[in-house]
Amino acid sequence: MRLSSLAAATTLGLALALTSVAPAFAGPAEREANCAALGGTLSGNGANQTCTVVTVVVAPDVPAGTPTTVYSADRPVGDPVTVDTSLPARQPDPAVTTEERNVGDAVVVGTERAGTPVVTEEERDAGEPISESVIVAGTPTSTTRTEFGTPVSVQTPTTIDCERVNHERAARPVERCERAALTTTTTPTTIVTTTTTPRQLVTTTTQPRETLITTTTPFTEVFTSTQQRELCTTLTYQTQIATMTTQLTERTATTTQPTTRTTTTTTTTYSFPRGTDVPTPSGTPTVTSSTAPGTPVVTEAVVPGTPIVTTGTRPGPEESDTTCAPIAPVVTVTEGDTRQQVETATVPAEPVITVTSEDVEPLVVETETPGAPIVTTDTRGTGETCTITPAAGKQRGSGC
């Protein structure tokens, strides 16, 4: 076979290569290494050692036998197509509706209606007001103040800081004092009394008044409309239309093609000639082939399925029958513009009297009366000493 020849040639080339590079008379280790380089297994002892190389070649799978096809379930594809197969057919139990509607144009008649008069009274001024003014005095109040005059001072001699200088058992005491000047100041006073009398200007104003009486009578346009009417009864029927719907389908076809696989095994034996460790082919290689099922080839394709046809119905257009009969007319009264008729009259009314008061400058009167004078004293020493004693005749030179 071609595959086995190719394997044998490859192995032979590898052996020749080992012959060119391996040293002569190498040891057993080199034989094992050279055999392993060929992918073989070393066996035997001494000069009987052999190297066995097994080469396995698996060919590609090839079709074999008759393919089988399996179909999947149908599945819808695209939109269904529906067609009508009958005319609309009325259904029982129609819906009943009634409607009132106008017949022709309304007839309108216009009149005028007088309303209830509205009487209003309004007081207003009649002429210019008349005013009178008087001054009214209030309760007077008084306040007092003290005014001081020019003070008058008078000095008189006196003594201060007196101290006894003789024995306490003496019949008469003798005192040594400091001469001083006593200043007496008298200030005259005057009591001033201020009397204030408040005053008000009281003004009385009389305003003449009159009452204006207004009578307003409304007159409204009234329009009476008469509209003829009728009652219409409508029977509405639902309808049905028979339909046929076609739904296209598709399915998946799965085809399985069996295959076979051929495996070729080539066994080559190498020996080692005397004096060398290079494996040398010996004999003819053994070639064996075996065939087994391979991997099946599976392909899928989409093919048309069986159309699905269904029948049904759909709602059709409504169909109606209407009958009408006269009913009572509708009378509508509407109001239009309103005009006002106004009449006025005047009668005297009570005058309005207004009293106002306004503060004016008060009346102030002052009176003066003499007050009690204010007397003050001031004692100041002169620094000179003197003696006070009953026996003044014996101490004339230093007597106070």
Image (cartoon, rainbow, N blue to C red):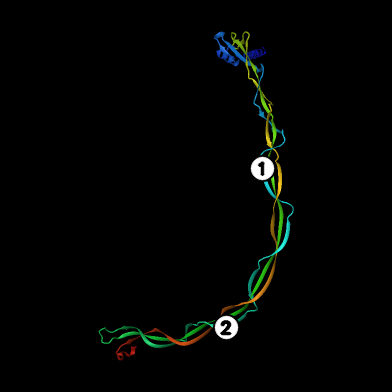
Q: Is residue 361 above or below residue 393?
A: above
Q: Is residue 183 above or below residue 301?
A: below
Q: Nearer the viewer, residue 156 or 30?
A: 156
Q: Is residue 226 above or below residue 262?
A: below
As helix, strand or loop, the secondary structure at mark 1 comes to strand
Q: Amino acid at mark 2?
A: Val
Which quadrant would the C terminus be assigned to in this image? bottom left
Identify the residue position indicated by label 2 in the image. Answer: 134
Distance from disc 2 to disc 1, alpha carbons, whole Å, reads: 98 Å
Identify the residue position indicated by label 1 in the image. Answer: 95
Residue 192: x %, y % from top left: 48, 85
Q: Amino acid at mark 1?
A: Ala
Q: Earlier in the sequence, mark 2 or mark 1?
A: 1
Q: Nearer the viewer, residue 112 or 339?
A: 112
Q: Nearer the viewer, mark 2 or mark 1?
A: 1
Residue 186 shows up from this direction:
no
